[in-house]
Image (cartoon, rainbow, N blue to C red):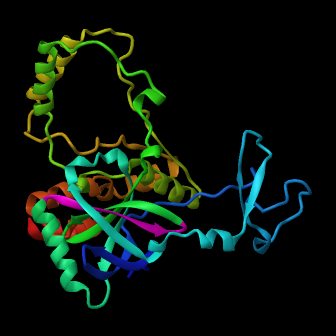
Amino acid sequence: MANPVWTGTLSFGLVSMGARLYSARERHGPTTHQFVKGTSDRVRYKRVNESTGEPVSQDDIVKGAQYGSDRDSYVVLEPEELERIQPVRSKTLEVEGFVETASIDPLWYASTYYVGPDKGAAKPYRLLCRALTESGRAGLGRMVMRGREHLVLITPQQGVLTASTLYWPDEIREPEDVMRPPSGEVEDKDLELAEQLIEAMAADWEPDQYTDEYERRLEELIEAKAKGSTISYEPEEPEEQGKVVALDDALRRSLQERRGKKGGRKTGGARRAPAPRRSQEQASAEKSAPEQRNAPTKKELMARAKELGVEGRSKMSRDELAAAVDSAG
């Protein structure tokens, strides 16, 4: 069971309940470190005094902030001073209003947490979750977490509540701040073709069909290096360059190609990765085990498991998927 990142009170109107926030996301995959080239010596970083170069203890470090136009002008902020300016709602997530969920653009979302009820709060928790689901609205409020005040959106997800921190208005850039928006009009014939192409490429959101290809390759490389070998992949063929195609012609050809595809499989899954180019040692080992070389990939097994309606497939390992598919099939 994960540890909560925040514990306090969630309130809307005169209704309040104890609540806990849990991180809804986590990163997976190998962790790489820095080494001195040609050795196994790790590279470490130390806190040092910029002027003297001497190490500094964590107990001797305080926060400071730059002010004015002079880059060397700072004020030191003592821990007691920072604590005194904490807002009153440091342990309260108070909903100030309910907004249409669809009115909040994804651009505003920062981080998302699962909201869990504290002891004795199950009834109001279920009530709020059901009411938000039925109304299509989300609770908008504010809270303090990790020393900062956050704008928070409370929404129902998969039968539970989530709290998504939002960026403040002054943190959102306008497109004109970073780029020059394109000008000109869209021709009706091109728009019609683009809409047809979008419809032809329509797909369902099926996250278990997507995998982190780089992470998979990195894990294979680490495993191969640990065995004294290496691994690489055949380069993917680059797209044809230098040939200028009119927009309407490109749209028509794309639409014809999409309609001409056979098998009825919708676009949406990740492209099949090119086969890895093995080292000589690995190639010899694979020749002695052709059944392993021709075994279906986890992604292929996942697709087959979906067709067969295998439950819990997204949490299964490759071997578990193979067994489940074999049993269901």
**Which residue is painted at 30% across and 67% down in the image?**
95
Question: In x, y percent, where is residue 148?
Answer: 52, 63
Residue 220, how many percent across, how many down? Answer: 46, 55
Image x and y of residue 251, in percent:
18, 18
Residue at 78%, 62% in the rendered image: 47
Percent across and percent down for residue 252 are 14, 16
Which part of the image, by quadrant, shows the C terminus?
Answer: bottom left
Q: Residue at x 32, y 85 (%)?
A: 118
Q: Is any part of residue 316 visible from this angle?
A: no
Above or below, 219 against 56 in this view is: above
Left or right: where does residue 186 sit relative to residue 48? left
Q: Quadrant of the N terminus?
A: bottom left
The part of the image, by quadrant, that contains residue 31 is bottom right
Query: Which region of the structure is painted magenta?
Result: 136-147
Q: Nearer the viewer, residue 38 or 128?
A: 128
Decide if residue 268 is in sight here: yes
Residue 140 inside the magenta-drawn segment: yes
Q: Quadrant of residue 139?
A: bottom left
Residue 25 is drawn in which quadrant?
bottom left
